[in-house]
């Protein structure tokens, strides 16, 4: 009997685009890089002057706040952010 994936969800590139859009909506001046790492797993790098003077945790909270809806619920397309890098230009 072969393994059958019933609901693999949208392609990683599509989800990466949704992540990018959500962050861009919250941080319009940001430079955003998204790398899919596996089903539902992503690495994110955001560069924005809005991070200036903020501690790392607060910087990351800004990004996570932007993508909360993509990580919520039992069938969320984003399961984990394996790496989140926040940079000041």
Image (cartoon, rainbow, N blue to C red):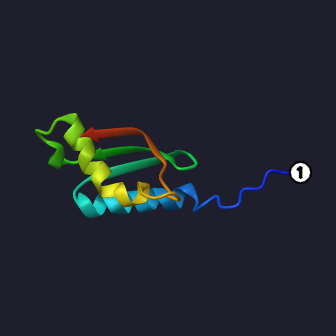
Find residue 6 and report its image quarter: bottom right
Name the residue rendered at 27%, 42% in the picture: 60
User: Image height check: is 87 above or below 39?
Assistant: above
Is 63 left or right of 81, judged from the image as shown?
A: left
Residue 81 visible in the picture:
yes
Name the residue rendered at 25%, 46% in the picture: 61
Residue 88 appears at what percent x and percent y?
20, 41
Is 6 left or right of 41, judged from the image as shown?
A: right
Residue 88 visible in the picture:
no
Task: Kindly give the residue lying farthest to the front in the view shown.
Answer: 74
Name the residue rendered at 29%, 49% in the picture: 63
- Nearest the eye: 71 or 24: 71
- Where disc 1 sits, the SS reads loop
Q: Residues within 10 Å of mark 1 (few under 14, many from 20)?
A: few
Is 83 left or right of 56, judged from the image as shown?
A: right
Residue 77 appears at what percent x and percent y?
50, 57
The quarter in which the C terminus is drawn is top left
- Nearest the eye: 54 or 65: 65
- How many numbered tags mark residues here? 1
Which residue is tagged 1?
1
Task: Kindly give the residue lying farthest to the left in the view shown.
Answer: 53
Residue 37 appears at what percent x and percent y?
53, 43
Name the residue rendered at 65%, 61% in the picture: 7
- Nearest the eye: 55 or 4: 4
Residue 31 appears at what percent x and percent y?
29, 51
């Amino acid at each position: 009997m072969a393994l059958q994936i019933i609901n693999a969800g949208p392609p990683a590139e599509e989800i990466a685009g949704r992540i990018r859009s959500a962050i861009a909506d919250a941080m319009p001046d940001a430079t955003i890089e998204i790398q899919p790492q596996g089903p539902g797993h992503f690495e994110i790098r955001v560069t924005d002057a809005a991070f200036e003077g903020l501690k790392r945790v607060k910087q990351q909270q800004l990004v996570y706040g932007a993508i909360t809806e993509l990580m919520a619920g039992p069938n969320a397309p984003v399961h984990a952010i394996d790496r989140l890098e926040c940079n000041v230009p």
